[in-house]
Amino acid sequence: MAQNDSLAKFLDTAVDAAKRAGEIIRNGFYQTKNVEHKGQVDLVTETDKACEDLIFNHLKQQFPAHKFIGEETTAACGATELTDEPTWIVDPLDGTTNFVHGFPFVCISIGLTIGKIPIVGVVYNPIMDELFTGVRGQGAFFNGKPIKVSSQTELVKSLLATEAGTKRDKPTLDASTNRINSLLFKVRSLRMSGSCALNLCGIACGRLDLFYELGFGGPWYACTFLSSFLSYVKYMRVMSCLVLRDVAAGVVIVEEAGGLVYDP
């Protein structure tokens, strides 16, 4: 584990990179976007690419020996293997579809893993100026103030979040809608914000009580993020599956806020 002074430098550098990338996102938010398709509904813009370049260049200046995994580089070059080396994992613009449509739930997600375990997490929504941070063993914060997960103890009073994903084949959609139909009988209501990283931060600060996402990206992803009221669920550390783009930062923030991460 890195020393506290190193962790502080990692966090400060990640926050600085996120704020700088946030300026690019704010400048482009209300402008016409040049949109490309990575899939049927999975989008990428020039802003995604510009933010990733800025973030990686900023981090590499400070930590040239570290490794780097980014959403756009991974999309272009294929999956990158995670090693035990310090590795920065970045989604430069989580919520690209929201960005394209002018819906303000967009963010930068920057996570650092050491020994394949997420250690530092930074999630920044530049449109709403909301900064979430977490360092393993040092707590989670929202705009500098400590945060904790929901204390809700009843599922029927809980707010659930999920996402539709990017697959549009009938078996996947049928499974997703059937799952939602079943869950809506058990919870107060459901939200889909369009940003996995911001859903995780919603869990961390108590806005949401439960978040799950299934089958969205193969072996890079785990599935469920819970506030502490579901502590009866066996907690499984599957950090090797929790490391790409919008998950690497959020998992630190959730856990440091007292939440649970579970791979069903």
Image: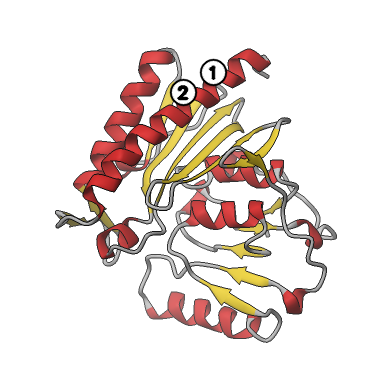
Q: Residue at x 67, y 14 (%)?
A: 3
Circle 2: element type: helix
Query: Please, what is the three-letter code of the amino acid marked with disc 2?
Result: Thr
Residue 221: where, in percent of width, then height? Answer: 53, 50
Q: Residue at x 44, y 47 (%)?
A: 129
Look at the picture and state if 174 lies above or below 50.
Answer: below
Which residue is the site of mark 2? 13
Look at the picture and state if 84 lies above or below 219.
Answer: above
Q: Quadrant of residue 238?
A: top right
Apparent side of residue 101 relative to residue 34 in the rendered image (left or right):
right
| Quarter occupied by the N terminus | top right
Q: Residue at x 56, y 29 (%)?
A: 113
Instruction: Find the distance from the CA under tag 2 to the CA under tag 1.
Output: 6 Å
Look at the picture and state if 157 lies above or below 94.
Answer: below
| Quarter occupied by the C terminus | bottom right
Question: Would you call the spot at circle 1 few (<14 residues within 10 Å), some (14-19), or many (20 or more)?
Answer: few
Circle 1: element type: helix
Which residue is the site of mark 1? 9
Look at the picture and state if 174 lies above or below 4.
Answer: below
Residue 245: where, in percent of width, then height? Answer: 45, 43
Closer to the camera in the image, 153 or 184 = 153
